[in-house]
Amino acid sequence: FKSTIRTFLAAIQLLMRDPNECIALFSYKTTAAEGFLKQIMRELESNEHLLWLFPDILYADPYTEARQWTPTHGIIIKRGVNRQEASIEAHGLYDAQPTGKHPTCHIIDDAMHMSFTTTPERLQGVEEGYRMSRNVRDIGDDFFTMMHGTIYDFQDFHARLKDNPPTGMSVSVYPATVDGSMDGDPVLQSKAGLLKDLETMGPTAFASQKLLDPSKAKK
């Protein structure tokens, strides 16, 4: 649900509120970010309610009318500025980053991947990629970043950010149970559904994915 609310829906809301917004959509690798962008594209192409509400922003047929409409190079909606940045572009934090771009906001979805916890070098690479991305931005005071993901390890990037957030960053943690425990009362799912997830996922994956706390797997 994090990606649904804070990547998919938030990106659309930002553009409908201000079509001049330029969003850099980051993930741990480019193809993952492009996957999120493809979902957004499908919605902007086919959601008849959005097309009816925002004909001044959305194209009826973006593949023939829009200046740019691909997951690889980004999408450009109807807007009142001429910028080199697309309305939304997809980039990888770890494998590829743009140069010379100045988006007005960043949405970072899954900076970490489970495979990155296997070596200190890969963990360091994610953090360095994040820090480099700080320079890929508009210098205006209105620039902002939304980030969300899964904590796989005590020393991974998300865990360090949670424990020591940079100045100006607020951290929100919403586990799947009310008290954050393995057998606590569920927040969104039924009790039976949550227990089924615990059974099929196992305690390690459940603690990371559902409770956002790997230490709970050992309790």
Image (spheres, rainbow, N blue to C red):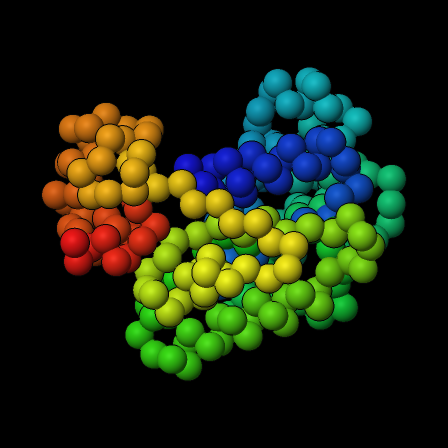
| Res. 33 in view | no
Q: Going by the picture, which residue comes out furthest to the left?
A: 199
Relative to 47, residue 218 above or below: below
Left or right: 188, with 201 as reference point: right
Q: Going by the picture, which residue comes out furthest to the bottom?
A: 121
Query: Residue 104 placed where, x, y %?
Result: 74, 51
Q: How many marks?
A: 0
Q: If the image is split into quadrants, where does the N terminus sit?
A: top left
Query: Residue 110 placed where, x, y %?
Result: 46, 55
Relative to 168, residue 9 above or below: above
| Residue in view at x 65 percent, y 33 percent | 13
| Res. 151 in view | yes
Left or right: 187, with 60 as reference point: left
Relative to 78, residue 128 above or below: below
Relative to 20, residue 84 above or below: below
In the foreground, 135 or 187 = 187
| Residue in view at x 29 percent, y 42 percent | 180
Left or right: 11, with 18 as reference point: left
Query: Residue 140 placed where, x, y %?
Result: 82, 54
In the foreground, 68 or 164 = 164
